Image (spheres, helix red, strand yellow):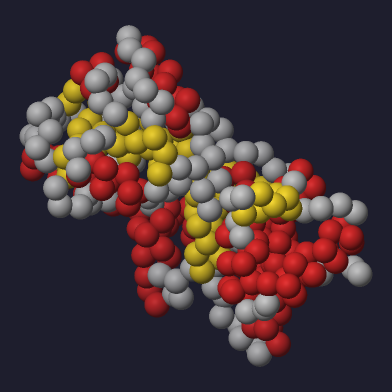
Amino acid sequence: MELEVRHLRTLTTVASLGSITKAAAVLGVAQPALSAQLSRIDRALGGPTFVRDHRGVRPTPLGALVLDRARTLLPAMDALLQDARRVACDDTATTLRLATAGSALTAPLVHRLSSGGAPPPTLRSTPDPVRAVAELAAGAHDAVLAGMCGDALPPARPGIAWRLVGTDAVRVVVGEDHPTTGDVPLAQLAAEHWVTAAGGSCFAECFLRACARAGFAPPTPSECDRAAGLELVRAGVAVALTEPYGDLPAGLRALTLRGTPLTWSTWLATHDDTPTDVRARLGAAARDARRDELAAARARRARSSPDLDRRVRPAV
């Protein structure tokens, strides 16, 4: 048996659910049939892809290798099929395919790109910029919008060009009843429990280094998705690190860190052979989205704290 795309989809479904029983239900097949298919896949690959234990199934080293490649190949195959069907139907409308990784500028950028009657981009979200740019190189996307620690550089990839949209100060989100207000030194928050967004960035390590420079060692930050993190903050059990963009839900407010000990950079990646007009359109939309979001954030801070320093680092 030769390995096919449908086999890769089967493996990724089993891996994501961690259970053959659950995967069989999602795939619409009987569990014995799925087990038999996995055995045939294992024989085609030359070894087992999963091991079973009391908690379900987990990938073997061979399975992890195949899954890592599948996460790049499957989006590229989906993009190929989408483009082929569009050409076959004589549909000349061009829809940008945008991948995002760790950037709160996604919605403002989509709004900018959709202005003037243009169709909105097709979005794909991934927590890992490395995977996003690998998929970009494979042809699954037209561009990647990625956020990462201000001290980090984006992952290099042949044929891919990165452009810095801008670098901005990280804010601290606290509950509205938190005793701290305004512009605070990081050390003043030494006793807090921290939460950051999950992802492939080095931001947690950058945060720990900033704390060391401030003279304290916090507990290792918890990582979770944005919604869960903000709920922890609202409940008063943590404070969160966040980008300076977007409104906060009711019951939360933002503090600025004195001296800007932590920064977050937004990068935009395209193919080297992306048409110049498309690259210019993406770059202008990203810059305008950042400018508008920073202006809105400054207005909000001015209303709550008129003397707050509003400086940001410009794009270079």
Observer-nearest of 149 and 27: 27
- Spot occupied by residue 130 in the image (x, y as percentages of width and height): 62, 44
- Spot occupied by residue 72 in the image (x, y as percentages of width and height): 69, 56
For this view, does 161 lie left or right of residue 100? right
Instruction: Give the residue at x 86% y 52%.
Output: 47
For this view, does 222 lie left or right of residue 1? left
Observer-nearest of 297 and 6: 6
> Compared to 37, does 70 lie above or below?
above
**Image quarter for residue 207?**
top left
Split into 4 quadrants, where in the image is the N terminus? bottom right
- Spot occupied by residue 50 in the image (x, y as percentages of width and height): 73, 53
For this view, does 17 lie left or right of residue 52? left
For this view, does 191 lie left or right of residue 9? left
Q: How many marks?
A: 0
> Compared to 159, does 5 lie above or below?
below
Instruction: Give the residue at x 90% y 68%.
Output: 2
**Image quarter for residue 138?**
bottom right
Q: Is residue 65 visible?
A: no
Which residue lies most toward the top here?
215
Instruction: Give the residue at x 80% y 70%.
Output: 36
> Compared to 248, does 140 lie above or below?
below
Instruction: Give the residue at x 50% y 64%.
Output: 123
Q: Is residue 211 visible?
A: yes
- Spot occupied by residue 125 in the image (x, y as percentages of width and height): 50, 57
Observer-nearest of 273 and 201: 201
